[in-house]
């Protein structure tokens, strides 16, 4: 992850996840759902749809994190960072400190994906609390490793990583609260907002450390550059809140348009009794014919 590509991979992954959850949140609010994602029914009552048969989110986590681990070990091609200790050196020093920290982070997110798969595919009933706890643990591990990851770095790298730790810790805290107090509207909104901020700031980190648009590197010894880092982070907070509101607005338009397509003029749907007799069904049919003009 110590390269531009290494930082872009998790940044794009978190961005896609955050956009997905922003859409889920918006649709849940617009439809008045009491849960963000309805839990799966018991295993013996699940349908044949792909969403109910396969734990797709867990599989995506596992594939994405496994790709990240391979990148840490063998990217660029020809590199091999699988050694943990230099046994040729009499002092036996540890090797590739940053790489193994990144691998540890990826591994805990992979563990979260495995927990999702086991909960949704192997258990008789989905355990949502266990899934949230595994996600919270992964983000706590990121914060813990970041605290040592920034040691012996310059002021610029320390500042961008500390700012990255802020939404990461808040996200871990909200996931932890969700284990005990699930299905809270405020937590849905805050959690989605923090994932958006985390992903956008990780993209900003790529720009600051590896690809500044001006072509001039940021100066760690410049108080002005350091001040603008914090200023930009505050802008990310506001911009991601606006993005979340924009996604809600677009979903609102889509729901209204979809509802208008589904509602044909002059047609009204009635609930058919599950235990209706032949006479009741005939009466309902005659009422519908009269309402539609005998067609």
Image (cartoon, helix red, strand yellow):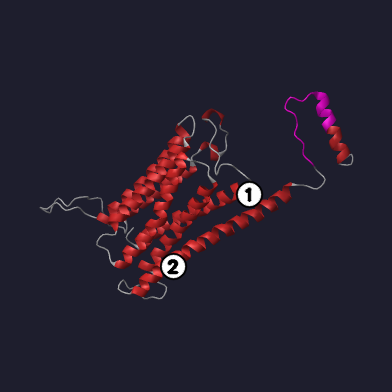
Please check the rendered image and state whether residue 275 is part of the magenta-colored stretch, yes or no: yes
Find residue 112 and report its horizontal and vertical position in percent.
40, 43
Label 1's element? Answer: helix
Q: Position of residue 106 (x, y in %)?
A: 36, 49
The kind of secondary structure element at disc 2 is helix
Q: Determine whether label 1 and label 2 are within 8 Å by CB.
A: no
Which residues fall within the magenta stretch?
268-284
Residue with the mark numbered 1: 30
* Observer able to see residue 69: no
Along the line of sight, the residue nearer the viewer: 55 or 217 = 217
The residue lying at 63 percent from left, 49 percent from top is: 30
Label 2 crowding class (10 Å Cα cut-off): few <14, some 14-19, many 20+? few
Q: Quadrant of the N terminus?
A: bottom left
Q: Position of residue 73 (x, y in %)?
A: 30, 53
Q: Nearer the viewer, residue 155 or 274?
A: 155
Residue 286, position as x, y percentages in the image:
86, 33
Q: Quadrant of residue 244?
A: bottom right
Residue 9 inside the magenta-drawn segment: no
In the picture of the structure, the residue carrying the numbered disc 2 is: 232
Q: Is residue 3 above or below residue 225?
A: above
Q: Is residue 136 left or right of residue 255?
A: left
Looking at the image, which residue is at 77% across and 25% down?
A: 276
Residue 219 vertical position relative to residue 5 in the rendered view, above or below: below
């Amino acid at each position: 992850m110590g390269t531009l590509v290494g930082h872009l991979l998790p940044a794009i992954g978190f961005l896609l996840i955050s956009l997905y959850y922003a859409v889920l949140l918006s649709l849940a609010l617009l439809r008045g759902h009491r849960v963000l994602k309805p839990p799966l029914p018991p295993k013996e009552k699940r349908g044949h749809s792909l969403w109910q048969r396969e734990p797709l989110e867990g599989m995506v986590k596992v594939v994405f994190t496994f790709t990240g681990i391979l990148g840490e070990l063998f990217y660029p091609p020809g590199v091999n960072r699988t050694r943990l200790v230099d046994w040729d050196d009499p002092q036996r020093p540890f090797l590739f400190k940053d790489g193994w920290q990144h691998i540890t982070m990826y591994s805990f997110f992979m563990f979260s994906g495995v927990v999702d798969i086991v909960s949704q595919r192997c258990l008789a009933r989905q355990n949502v609390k266990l899934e949230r706890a595994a996600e919270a643990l992964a983000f706590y591990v990121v914060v813990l490793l970041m605290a040592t990851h920034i040691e012996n770095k310059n002021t610029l790298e320390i500042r961008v990583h500390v700012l990255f730790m802020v939404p990461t810790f808040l996200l871990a805290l909200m996931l932890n609260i969700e284990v005990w107090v699930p299905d809270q509207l405020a937590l849905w909104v805050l959690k989605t907002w923090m994932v958006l901020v985390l992903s956008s700031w990780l993209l900003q980190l790529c720009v600051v450390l590896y690809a500044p648009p001006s072509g001039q590197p940021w100066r760690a010894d410049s108080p002005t550059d350091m001040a603008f880092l914090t200023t930009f982070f505050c802008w990310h907070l506001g911009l991601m809140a606006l993005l979340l509101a924009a996604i809600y607005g677009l979903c609102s338009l889509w729901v209204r348009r979809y509802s208008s397509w589904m509602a044909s003029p002059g047609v009204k749907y009635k609930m058919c009794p599950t235990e209706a007799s032949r006479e009741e069904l005939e009466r309902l049919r005659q009422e519908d014919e009269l309402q539609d003009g005998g067609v």
